[in-house]
Image (cartoon, rainbow, N blue to C red):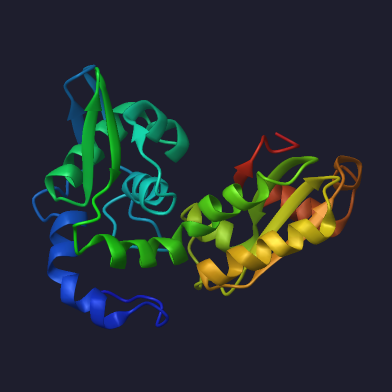
Amino acid sequence: MILVDTSIRIDRLHACEPELIAVLCPAHDRGLTIDIMENNLRYMRTGAPLLAPIFRSEGQAQLLSTVLLTGDELSLTDLAERAGVAYPTAHRETARLLDAGILSERHVGRTRLIRANGDSPLVMPLREILMIATGPVVILADELARIDRIESVFLYGSFAARMLGVAGPPPHDIDVMVIGRPDVDAVYEACTRAEELVRRPVNPAILTSEEFAATSGFLDDVRRGPVVAVIGELPWR
């Protein structure tokens, strides 16, 4: 049985549930390591993401998020970079998703361009799950990148912790730290738009780099706790 947020179209998910399980968590592929013949390296398979445990691995969820939530057509190299996974992982997972018909590809010269397969009945329910589970990073990066004078953005708090595999209760909201001197209204408007898409409250905190460097109980907890980069480098690492 798959447990998902009740805001997802359950009827559509149930209709595709057997196919989703077969594609995302194939029974024959439970091993902890996989030989990558291309470079004779052995890669440890990452665990299923806590926010969306129906996916076989964090890498698979990130790849699908990058393609399905942006609508972009990407080369394998660009896909791996934007999803934050190793190229062999991107190659392996993309091949599996192409075989399942969730992704499609076209060739431009020697470059393979990967995109969502609009004809697959699995794409829409997967997009809805990913929007809630991993969408905040993709959506906030897209929204906030349009605003000037932002130096870095990262998630912190319970949502970031669950994304990084830290056990705990499901997060109810998303805490976002914005470092720089942006237009405050523009940041709040961007977070409101993201909130409507990801179906969770998005709470931005906006600080200059000097303010963030200050010592306080709250900021010390943020710096010590789990964080997920959205834009730029983490300012203290």
Residue 106, given in percent of the width and then of the height, sits at 22, 33
- Which residue is rendered at x = 62% and y = 52% of the image? 143
Residue 115, given in percent of the width and then of the height, sits at 30, 43
Residue placed most toward the observer, 226 or 184:
184
Quadrant location, the N terminus: bottom left
Residue 109, given in percent of the width and then of the height, sits at 25, 18
Left or right: 175, with 168 as reference point: right
- Which residue is rendered at x = 65% and y = 56% of the image? 156
Q: Is residue 54 at all visible to an observer of this figure?
A: no
Residue placed most toward the observer, 213 or 118:
118
Residue placed most toward the observer, 128 or 157:
128
Q: Is residue 93 above or below residue 3?
A: above
Q: Is residue 109 above or below residue 51?
A: above
Residue 18, given in percent of the width and then of the height, sits at 13, 69
In the image, farthest residue toward the front: 108
Left or right: 95, with 113 as reference point: left
Q: Give the total number of marks visible in the rendering.
A: 0
| Quarter residue 157 falls in | bottom right
Q: Is residue 204 above or below residue 149?
A: below
- Which residue is rendered at x = 70% and y = 49% of the image? 224
Quadrant location, the C terminus: top right
Q: Is residue 116 at all visible to an observer of this figure?
A: yes
Left or right: 195, with 74 as reference point: right
Q: Is residue 10 above or below residue 79?
A: below
